[in-house]
């Protein structure tokens, strides 16, 4: 197994995102797939959606105001310590995260108001973070 042995390259996606909870039997709504980044996960107890905050209807159970930091991938599936290398400095800075993993890479969401502190904490931990315009 390989382990993260150097700083990761991350970029902050443009826009603001929301984390939504729907019922376990609900169909994925059309509004959930608007924009360039979204994630839909079904479990036995819920349908969880992360999507563009502007697309979420006022009636949805959701918390908005998140930024997405994406790790530049693709990452090997047997690479260990990726999330730990991000979570530890954020936890030390008192910043909560919400994580999403895909086949190629990992993403962490932090509250908009914590973004600058998150970037600082990640850079101090040796990661490289850039902010995309848009």
Image (cartoon, rainbow, N blue to C red):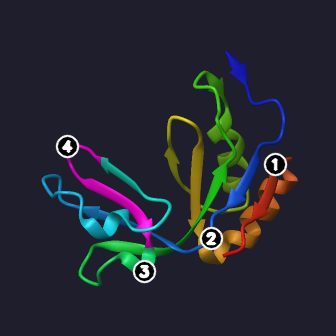
| Residue tagged 1 | 127
Question: Which mark is on residue 44?
Answer: 4
At 28% from the left edge and 73% from the top edge, which residue is drawn? 61
Vertical arrangement, residue 25 with respect to residue 58, above or below: above
Q: Which element is circle 2 on? A: loop
Q: Which element is circle 3 on? A: helix
Q: Between 9 and 90, which is closer to the camera in this rendering?
A: 9
Q: CA distance from mark 1 to mark 3?
A: 30 Å
Q: Could you classify mark 3 by the number of other residues whose Cα lies within 10 Å: few (under 14), some (14-19), or many (20 or more)?
A: some
| Residue tagged 3 | 54
At 66% from the left edge and 40% from the top edge, which residue is drawn? 73
The answer to which quarter of the image holds residue 59 is bottom left
Q: Which element is circle 4 on? A: loop
If you read the primary sequence from the N terminus, does the residue marked by circle 2 or circle 1 appear first? 2
Left or right: residue 76 versus residue 48 is right
Image coordinates for residue 89, horizontal then vertical, percent: 74, 51
Question: Which mark is on residue 14?
Answer: 2
Image coordinates for residue 43, horizontal then vertical, percent: 25, 44
Mark 4 or mark 3, whichever is nearer to me: 3
Q: Residue furthest left?
A: 25
If you read the primary sequence from the N terminus, does the residue marked by circle 4 or circle 2 appear first? 2
């Amino acid at each position: 197994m390989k382990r993260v042995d150097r700083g990761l390259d991350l970029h902050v996606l443009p826009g603001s995102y929301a984390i939504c909870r729907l019922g376990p039997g609900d169909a994925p709504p059309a509004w959930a797939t608007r924009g360039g980044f979204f994630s839909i996960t079904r479990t036995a107890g819920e349908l969880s959606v992360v999507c563009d905050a502007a697309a979420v209807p006022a009636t949805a159970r959701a918390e908005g105001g998140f930024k997405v930091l994406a790790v530049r991938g693709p990452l090997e599936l047997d690479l260990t310590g990726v999330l730990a290398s991000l979570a530890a400095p954020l936890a030390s800075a008192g910043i909560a995260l919400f994580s999403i993993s895909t086949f190629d890479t990992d993403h962490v969401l932090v509250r908009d108001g914590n973004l600058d502190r998150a970037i600082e904490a990640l850079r101090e931990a040796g990661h490289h973070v850039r902010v995309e315009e848009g």
